Amino acid sequence: MTGPRPADHTGEDRERMREVLLSLPEATLQVFLANRVHGLSYRRIAKRYGMPLWQVRRHMLRAIRHIDRYRDGRPPGW
């Protein structure tokens, strides 16, 4: 394991991550949470939100890149 476990994060870290997530566009946030928090597959998310599978993949890629920029110390942005 390369990074700290979630339990190792401080309240400040959690608050910053919350801010980063909330800065995502609404649709991207919903897709990300459906997959990472609720464990839905990309196909199930596509069906639930009435979008093509490629759009689900695009939203996930955008969310992950956005979070990676934060983790790398770069300001998240679009």
Image (cartoon, rainbow, N blue to C red):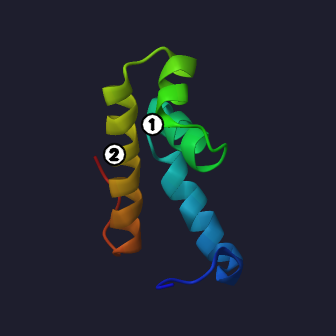
At x 65% / y 74%, what residue is drawn?
6
Marks 1 and 2 in Cβ contact (< 8 Å): yes
Tell me, for residue 28, which label it has, or none.
1
Tell me, for residue 62, which label it has, or none.
2
Q: Nearer the viewer, residue 45 or 73?
A: 45
Q: Position of residue 4 (x, y in %)?
A: 57, 84
Q: Is residue 40 left or right of residue 57?
A: right
Q: Nearer the viewer, residue 17 or 35?
A: 35
Residue 39 lies in quadrant? top right
At x 31% / y 28%, what residue is drawn?
54
Query: The residue tagged with tag 1: helix, strand or loop?
Result: helix
Q: Is residue 63 left or right of residue 32?
A: left
Amino acid type shown at disc 1: Thr
Q: Position of residue 35 (x, y in %)?
A: 56, 43
Q: Position of residue 78 (x, y in %)?
A: 28, 46
Disc nearer the start of the sequence (1/2): 1
| Cα separation between marks 1 and 2 | 7 Å
Above or below: residue 35 compared with residue 8? above
Residue 44 lies in quadrant? top right
